[in-house]
Image (cartoon, rainbow, N blue to C red):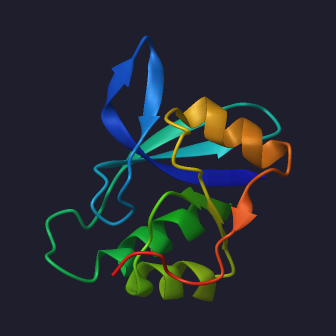
Amino acid sequence: MKVAVPILEKEFDGKKLVNLHFGKSNLFAIVDTETGEVKVLKNPALHLERGRGKFIAEMLKKEGVKAVLVKEMGPGAFNKVTGFGMTVYLIPAEVKFLNEAVELFKEGKLEVLTEPNEE
């Protein structure tokens, strides 16, 4: 299964850091949970003031993403992502790295986000 996680450009000890903000993230990691392959894509709508979620959701759908792992997601992005049939999972505050978030997802330890948690 392919999952998407907003990430920062900066890494720490070679590990990718999770970005707190979905729509404002410069980059998204698309991780194939079966093969471990990681593809990094740029946010196609970073230049927009509002409405970025639509373009990000479309990009993720084209990539075959089935789940999105986030710390925060606003209502616009949440509605677009879930409208495309993707499930949103909440990354706990203490989790800082992409590999940790994906591992928790694979172990079934992430909570499903049923509504936006950011204004």
**Residue 64 visible within the image:** no
- Kindly indicate the quadrant of the structure image that contains residue 112: bottom right
Whether residue 116 sits left or right of residue 85 in the image: it is left
The picture places residue 57, in percent across and down from the top left corner, at 48, 73
| Vertical side of 88 occupied by 99: above or below | above
Q: Of residues 2 and 22, which is closer to you in this image?
A: 22
Where's the C terminus, which quadrant?
Answer: bottom left
Whether residue 114 sits left or right of residue 16 in the image: it is right
Whether residue 70 sits left or right of residue 9 in the image: it is right
The picture places residue 5, in percent across and down from the top left corner, at 52, 50
**Residue 40 visible within the image:** yes
Extreme-top residue of the structure: 13
The picture places residue 89, in percent across and down from the top left corner, at 66, 63
- Kindly indicate the quadrant of the structure image that contains residue 62: bottom right
The picture places residue 103, in percent across and down from the top left corner, at 74, 36
Residue found 44% across the figure and 71% down from its top: 73
| Vertical side of 26 occupied by 44: above or below | below
Residue found 47% across the figure and 74% down from its top: 58
Residue found 68% across the figure and 41% down from its top: 102
| Vertical side of 62 occupied by 25: above or below | above
